[in-house]
């Protein structure tokens, strides 16, 4: 087994990796790190979730001189989310180094970013647009940036940033080292590499073939507000023997459970707010076929091994292609054909293309079994036909209304639920001092990760093992949605509305 020491990383970096629980390098790290440490330009291609950040981040950090206050390294990212994520990751790897890492991205006040830059940044992690802006204001000078990384380069292409990326590269020293990381390598990205990299070494990890072929996959485009009603409709049409429905958050899971129950469906929820005992109870009931539908979060469903699930429904689109494969892998086992249906809002429509590319599969638009079963045996078709008209009339519309009613008041946050209009909502965070997290870190996460204005944050209290934050009630749900399951200083954080 290769370990990080064999790759030539310094003890301070190794210690941080130890603390993060990184035992051995991932394949892309094993191949890219030595090349980068020996000074080569590197093109790294590997799927999402394979550890590309550390593959470029560790050599980058090792290369920096803490005593030199110039910007020595630049990481360009396509979106603010990725910018924040990469910054958090690099900070966690740099835990024992005296290195300042500054994130600059759009949608946040440029002034505070300028002042952070003025007080010294060894590494700047930036979105392309904000980088251009700061350069034109001369707040950011790249003359000493001898290490440049283009992260998730193919996504920059989707966003039309390539020309700006070229401009930025031209401002960096010509003797720089350049690394380009991407999940895919379309021709314009290859061309960029040819034009701006010096004799690059290509490091490529071909994905293991993912066995999603036995699974029929479809997507449904639906506005967020209509999701629940559409789900009810689709469940009636699909008639799953058993289905797992995945939601992004615990709050989302329990809300959906209630909505489906109100529609008379046989459903149970499985999420981290429940005691271990009741979770076990739900799992056993589901395995014994005493429950038809399970609404679950990814974390809660992790240990779930069930064989006869006919349908997996992604009520919320998964965060990564890896999660997608993991979720839908629960159907189509033991030679049976399963179905996976993924809901996307119009804004999330691009996610489907991304998953198709990463997983090398095709996901068509969902169609009713009538259309699908064109060539199926007759009796089954007739059975469906008989049932259809009744469903077509009244029900979907009623369901839509009911669901809209359901979602309405709660969407305003949980603090207001009990009627006695509380002025703040208290959120529980599963991390505290013991995980190396302090008040500043949490305030940073609320500001940068959940995009909360400072006025919306009323109190942040860090205890030994966990913390509490108090926010405006109408920001509570969003805060949970944005931060639950993300990482802070390399540790996964879980958030939920605190029980009073
Ligand atoms: P990518 O950029 O390829 O999508 P990331 O760099 O975001 O992937 O890493 C995905 C996840 O894997 C992160 O949560 C990261 O902390 C974790 N990770 C990366 N490298 C390792 C490793 N060597 N051991 C354990 N976990 C790792
Ligand atoms: Mg990445």
Image (cartoon, rainbow, N blue to C red):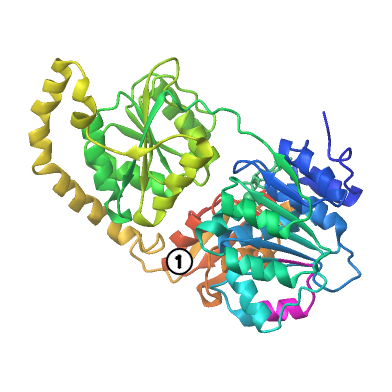
The quadrant where residue 341 appears: top left
Query: Residue at 18% of width from left, 53% of height from top?
Result: 401
What is the x, y in percent for residue 108?
57, 74
Choose between 125 and 408: the one closer to the eye: 125
Please, is residue 44 above or below residue 105 in the view?
A: above
Q: Is any part of residue 306 visible from this angle?
A: yes
Please, is residue 310 above or below residue 356 in the view?
A: above
Mark 1 secondary-structure assignment: helix
Query: Residue at 53% of width from left, 73% of height from top?
Result: 107
Please, is residue 238 above or below residue 117 in the view?
A: above
Please, is residue 252 above or below residue 135 in the view?
A: above
For disc 1, the marked residue is 475
Q: How many marks?
A: 1
What is the x, y in percent for residue 389?
8, 35
Magenta segment: 113-124
> Viewed as shown, does residue 497 lie left or right of 24?
left
Choose between 368 and 40: the one closer to the eye: 40
What is the x, y in percent for residue 6?
89, 37
Q: Residues within 10 Å of mark 1 (few under 14, many from 20)?
A: many
> Viewed as shown, does residue 352 lie left or right of 207?
left
Asked if the stretch drawn in magenta spans residue 202, the answer is no
């Amino acid at each position: 087994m290769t370990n990080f020491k064999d790759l030539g990383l310094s003890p301070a970096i190794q210690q941080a990796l130890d603390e993060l629980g990184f035992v051995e390098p991932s394949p892309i790290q094993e191949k890219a790190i030595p090349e980068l440490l020996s000074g080569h330009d590197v093109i790294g291609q590997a799927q999402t979730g394979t550890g590309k950040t550390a593959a470029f981040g560790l050599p980058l950090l090792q290369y920096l001189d803490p005593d030199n206050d110039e910007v020595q390294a630049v990481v360009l990212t396509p979106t603010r989310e990725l910018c924040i994520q990469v910054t958090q990751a690099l900070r966690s790897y740099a835990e024992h180094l005296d290195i300042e890492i500054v994130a600059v991205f759009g949608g946040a006040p440029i002034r505070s970013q300028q002042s952070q830059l003025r007080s010294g940044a060894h590494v700047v992690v930036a979105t392309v647009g904000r980088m251009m802006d700061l350069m034109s204001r001369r707040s950011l000078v790249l003359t000493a940036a001898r290490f440049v990384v283009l992260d998730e380069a193919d996504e920059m292409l989707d966003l039309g940033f390539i020309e700006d990326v070229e401009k930025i590269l031209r401002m960096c020293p010509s003797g720089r080292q350049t690394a380009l990381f991407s999940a895919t390598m379309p021709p314009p990205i290859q061309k960029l590499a040819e034009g701006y990299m010096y004799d690059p070494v290509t490091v490529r990890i071909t994905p293991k073939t993912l066995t999603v072929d036995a699974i029929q996959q479809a997507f449904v485009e639906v506005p967020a507000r209509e999701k629940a009603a559409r789900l009810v409709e689709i469940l009636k049409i699909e008639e799953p023997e058993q289905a797992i429905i995945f939601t992004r958050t615990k709050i989302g899971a329990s809300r959906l459970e209630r909505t489906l129950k109100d529609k008379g469906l046989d459903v149970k929820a499985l999420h981290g707010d429940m005691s271990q005992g009741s979770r076990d109870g739900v799992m056993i009931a589901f395995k014994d076929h005493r429950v038809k539908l399970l609404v679950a979060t990814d974390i809660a469903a992790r240990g779930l091994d069930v064989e006869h699930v006919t349908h997996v429904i992604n009520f919320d689109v998964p965060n990564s292609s890896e999660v997608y494969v993991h979720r839908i892998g629960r159907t189509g086992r033991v030679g049976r054909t399963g179905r996976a249906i993924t809901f996307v809002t119009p804004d999330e429509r691009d996610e489907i293309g991304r998953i198709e590319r990463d997983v090398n599969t095709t996901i068509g638009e969902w169609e009713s079994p009538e259309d699908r079963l064109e060539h199926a045996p007759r009796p089954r078709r007739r059975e469906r036909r008989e049932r259809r008209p009744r469903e077509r009339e009244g029900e979907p519309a009623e369901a839509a209304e009911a669901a809209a009613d359901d979602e309405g008041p709660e969407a305003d946050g949980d603090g207001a639920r009990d009627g006695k209009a509380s002025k703040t909502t208290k959120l529980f965070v599963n991390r505290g001092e013991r995980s190396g997290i302090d008040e500043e870190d949490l305030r940073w996460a609320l500001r940068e990760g959940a995009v909360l204005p400072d006025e919306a944050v009323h109190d942040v209290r860090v205890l030994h093992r966990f913390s509490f934050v108090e926010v405006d009630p109408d920001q509570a749900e969003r805060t949970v949605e944005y931060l639950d399951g993300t990482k802070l200083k390399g540790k996964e954080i879980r958030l939920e509305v605190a029980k009073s």
